[in-house]
Amino acid sequence: MFLTYIYLIAITAEAMSGALVAGRRNMDIFGVSVIAFVTALGGGTIRDILLGHFPIAWTQHPPYIYLTVGAGLLTIVVAKYMVHLRKVFLVLDALGLIAFTIIGCDVAQQLGYHTEVVVMSGMITGICGGVLRDLLCQRTPVVFCKEIYAGISLLVAIMYVGFHYLGIEQNLALAVIFVTGLTLRICAIYWRWSLPIFCYSSDEWD
């Protein structure tokens, strides 16, 4: 139940973040709605398609459509005030990353996939909504070039699989995972932790 509440908060926050990116690209109301929906539910959709998990999760929960699209449209109204909530959104985004990753791992685990696939399923669920958002908005996905983000999703997935293998009680495991993931994400933002950057330029390939 705890994870469900976090999930609902997370898809709402992700939808609003997607709407803000769409606004920076001067999209119309339909564009904002699509980007909000894709940002919030795109990762889970890709996961379900790749794993052959049908029907796709959100198609069985129509209120998720209203929630994400509604959150995107609400963002248009309250956008000028959202600059004051930036820190809140960073925390919600981190919680969403952790929740999406755990849910993705759980889906693959329930389907009987191998450990490596379970971890990849968690990461796909955690980061692919943001990747789709950025691609549709014609910008380099932030998960590939900003503070550690995908790495935290990977760590969360490994911890989830490891705790399950060790037989650690679920609520305790979730508490440890959320505290660890949230702490690392906040530290990564505050101290600008990032992976090494590969920068290459050569006229020979132009």
Image: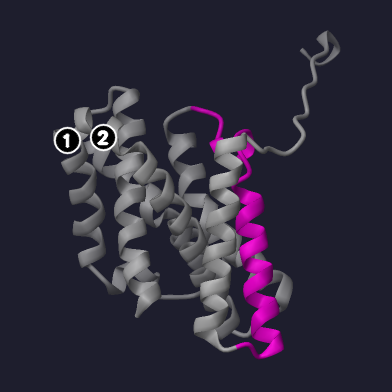
| Residue drawn where x is 57% and y is 89% of the image | 169
Q: Which mark is residue 8?
A: none
| Residue drawn where x is 71% and y is 79% of the image | 114
- How many residues crowd mark 1 within 10 Å: few (<14), some (14–19), many (20+)? few
54 or 153: nearer the eye? Answer: 153
Picture layout, residue 198 above or below residue 88:
above
Q: Quadrant of residue 21?
A: top left
| Residue drawn where x is 24% and y is 59% of the image | 65
Left or right of 76 in this view: 122: right
Picture layout, residue 44 above or below residue 39:
below
- Report the amino acid beneath label 1: Val
Picture layout, residue 101 above or below residue 86:
below
- Report the amino acid beneath label 2: Met
Query: Where are the magenta residues, as a range?
Result: 139-168
Residue assigned mark 1: 78
Q: Secondary structure at mark 2?
A: helix
Q: Quadrant of residue 143?
A: top right
What is the CA distance from the residue labelled 1 to the residue labelled 2?
A: 7 Å
